[in-house]
Image (spheres, grey):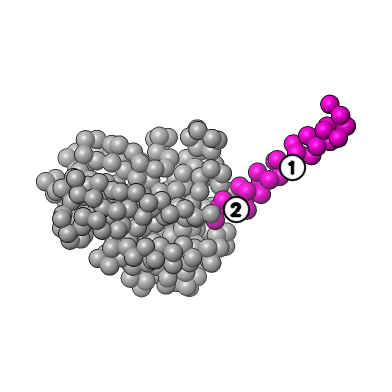
Amino acid sequence: MTRRRFLRAMLGGSAAPALAAAYAFGIEPQWLEFTQMDLPVEGLPPALDGKVLAHLSDFHVGPRVSDRYIVDALVRTARYAPDITVATGDFITYRHYSVEHAKRVYQSFPRGRLATLAVLGNHDYGPAWSHVGIAAEVCGVLRAAGVDVLRNETREVEGLCVAGLDDFWAPNFAPRKVLDAIDRTRPALVLSHNPDTVDLPGWEGIRGWVLSGHTHGGQVKAPFLRAPVVPVRNKRYTAGRFALAAGRSMYISRGIGFLVRVRCLVRPEVAVFRLRRT
């Protein structure tokens, strides 16, 4: 090897880690992807066939995530003209919560033509996921923005039952209250921030989809491998689509925001679904 080739190889090798770090810390954390796919639902009410459902999650409003970036994500979502908009929690970062700050950001929340629904995440309960007063304030901010927050409740949207579980780690978690209220003869759409809830008892006979967040997809992973760190019991639940029991599936969003500004091969996302009757 000549001296010139040796120096070129050394320079290339030393630059690679710096470029990778610049990408993981500077580019991908705010390189938002709009994932578009069909959401097939057996027995979907005919009025909803072909309608657009936008799924947002894990915003983490606070000093680490740019307000401009989040607002841009909200505005871009609105351009898809969703018929139904759902959000699956972590609207704030618990250590840096400000009501006025959240109000400024979420005044741009994209409303669905038929419904705009949400559930809370663990961060929305403040430190130790236990402050019901903070959760109530977050609900107030969202309701002022036109978002209907489901706290172990159900709603009917053009004949489709949409159920919302309160956060798995929070004091108001009461899954049987809402799961037992779901009509097993019809499909349902269940919003649950933490995907671990699908492994609890009470889901027997429920058909349709569960939409979740919480994991951020792990934020960092190696090519062709699962993310090594995800905050769930069932390490299978990282991001994307999962088949559950007969007649039921789950989609886990990679989320919009982050706690630590780093992502590698796990781009942030907003999922834009086209509901399909099967």
Q: Is residue 110 above or below residue 151?
A: below
Q: Is residue 108 shown to the viewer in this render?
A: yes
Q: Give above or below for 208 relative to 110.
A: above
The quadrant where residue 121 appears: bottom left
Q: CA distance from mark 2 to mark 1?
A: 17 Å
Looking at the image, can residue 202 be seen?
no
Where is residue 224 drawn, in percent x and y? 50, 33
Q: Which residue is mark 1?
A: 15
Q: Residue at x 74, y 42 (%)?
A: 15
What residue is shown at x 47% (from left), y 69% (from top)?
105
Instruction: Tell me the residue that label 2 is attached to.
Output: 27
| Closer to the camera in the image, 127 or 186 | 186
Tell me where residue 149 appears, x and y as whole percent. 31, 62
**For numbered disc 2, what is the local secondary structure?**
helix
Q: Quadrant of residue 114?
A: bottom left
Is 260 situated left or right of 75 in this image? right
Image vertical order of residue 81 relative to residue 235, above or below:
below
Q: Nearer the viewer, residue 181 or 125?
A: 181
Question: Which x, y percent locates residue 77?
Answer: 40, 62
**If the image is split into quadrants, where does the C terminus sit?**
top left
Mark 2, Cα crowd under 10 Å, few <14 / some 14-19 / many 20+, is: some
Disc 2 marks which amino acid? Ile
